Amino acid sequence: MYDKLSNEIKTVVSHYFQGIYNGDIDKLKNVFHLQTLLFGDIKGEPYFKTVTDYIEGVKSRKSPADLGEEFKMEIPSIEIMGDMATVKAHVPMLGFNYHDFLSLSLVPGEWKIVNKLFTHV
């Protein structure tokens, strides 16, 4: 059962990676819950956005793929407890060394990202 759930979560996070790497907002809209909040620390500056604002930002910027960046995103760890999961993701892109902590929930039968915490180190 763990392997099945883990693979489902990896698929969601892979779509998240593809969405931010390619600027594919449809993929991003599909992986995030509509009420997701994003909190971060970028070079000591606090960051807070709703998922709608975040996706709009992705839409308006040049994607890492368009800039010719190498895809280096990866999932160092996944923890699953019932219908909830946390994913630690390494997301180097656009000159940043992001580390994401994604909270996912199984909401009506689909894994969705419900919260994103991230920092650049």
Image (cartoon, helix red, strand yellow):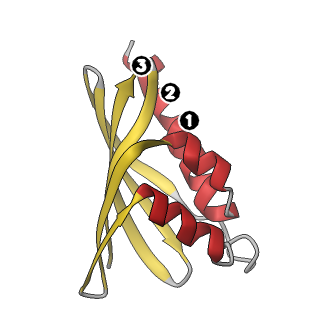
**Where the N terminus falls, by quadrant?**
top left
Density class for disc 1 (Cα within 10 Å; few <14, some 14-19, many ≥20) is some
Residue 11's disc is 1
Density class for disc 2 (Cα within 10 Å; few <14, some 14-19, many ≥20) is some
Q: Quadrant of residue 42?
A: bottom left
Q: Secondary structure at mark 1?
A: helix
Q: Which residue is mark 3?
A: 108
Residue 8's disc is 2
Residue 89 in picture, x, y percent from top left = 41, 55
In three-dimensional space, the C-alpha distance between marks 1 and 3, rounded to whole angstroms, equals 17 Å
Residue 76's disc is none
Q: Secondary structure at mark 3?
A: loop
The tag earlier along the polypeptide, 1 or 3, is 1
Report the residue at 76% width, 75% height from top.
66
Report the residue at 57% width, 54% height from top.
17
96 and 25: which one is in front? 25
Specify whether 98 is left or right of 47. Answer: right
Query: What amino acid type should be assigned to the residue bearing mark 2?
Result: Glu
- The answer to whether marks 1 and 3 mark residues whose Cβ atoms lie closer than 8 Å is no
The mark lying in front, picked from 2 and 3, is 3
